[in-house]
Amino acid sequence: MRWLVSARNLIAHRVSVANQLREHLKRVFPGALGLFEDLDSAISLKFLTRFDCQDRADWLTSTRLGAWLKSVRYRNMALQRTLTVEQFKEKVVEVKAELADFLNLIQITGALNFHLHPVGFILAQHEIRSRAPQLAALKDAAFDDA
């Protein structure tokens, strides 16, 4: 029972620290928010350790960001967590077959004239672009160079 209470306390503390960090970054370094999926992820913490203020982040060019992302093996981590279009379709079929039929019909008919991509990736890209457009552009350029 003590272990369970201790685990809950650790989780509550971690959430509290992440919330404090988020609030601090809103005031002093808003461009860092939303750059990576989770604020407390390993890549996000590595970025904040290396580029701890807007001035250091402004130093980044697409080449420098690309080199840094490669040095921390970000592309490999991102590729491991990214679904292919086929994996995404399989997951939709598994979770909600009628939605899969609808998406398939849209794709077959070309009603919206786009290729299906993993929705999570598209939403994440939009969020990054809206919160930190300069860093998003650098990140995109780094992947284009890779």
Image (tube, grey):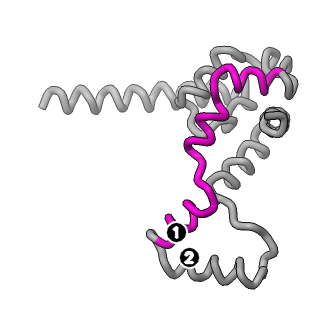
- Residue at 48% across / 78% down in the picture? 97
- Residue at 79% across / 21% down in the picture? 57
Q: Circle 2: is it few (<14), some (14-19), or many (20+) Cα within 10 Å?
A: some
What x and y, as percent, mark residue 1?
Answer: 12, 32
Q: Residue furthest left?
A: 1
Q: Of residues 106 and 7, which is closer to you in this image?
A: 106
Answer left or right for 35 relative to 65: left
Res 128 visible:
yes
- The part of the image, by quadrant, that contains residue 102 is bottom right
Q: Tell me, yes or no, whether the highlighted magenta stretch contains residue 82.
A: yes
Judging by the rendered image, the residue that carries numbered circle 2 is 100
- Disc 1 is placed on an element classified as helix
Q: Amino acid at mark 1?
A: Val
- Residue at 79% across / 25% down in the picture? 65
The magenta stretch is 64-93
**Sequence-wise, which precedes: disc 2 or disc 1?**
1
Answer left or right for 134 relative to 37: right
Determine whether label 2 and label 1 are within 8 Å by CB: yes
Does residue 8 sit above or below 86 in this rendering?
Answer: above
What x and y, as percent, mark residue 18?
Answer: 51, 29
Q: Which mark is residue 92?
A: 1
- The part of the image, by quadrant, that contains residue 21 is top right
Does residue 93 sit above or below 55 in this rendering?
Answer: below
What x and y, as percent, mark residue 133?
Answer: 82, 39
Res 133 visible:
no
Q: Of residues 58 and 105, which is closer to you in this image?
A: 105
Give the position of the C terminus as an image quadrant: top right
- Disc 2 is placed on an element classified as helix
Q: Circle 1: is it few (<14), some (14-19), or many (20+) Cα within 10 Å?
A: some
- Residue at 70% across / 66% down in the picture? 116
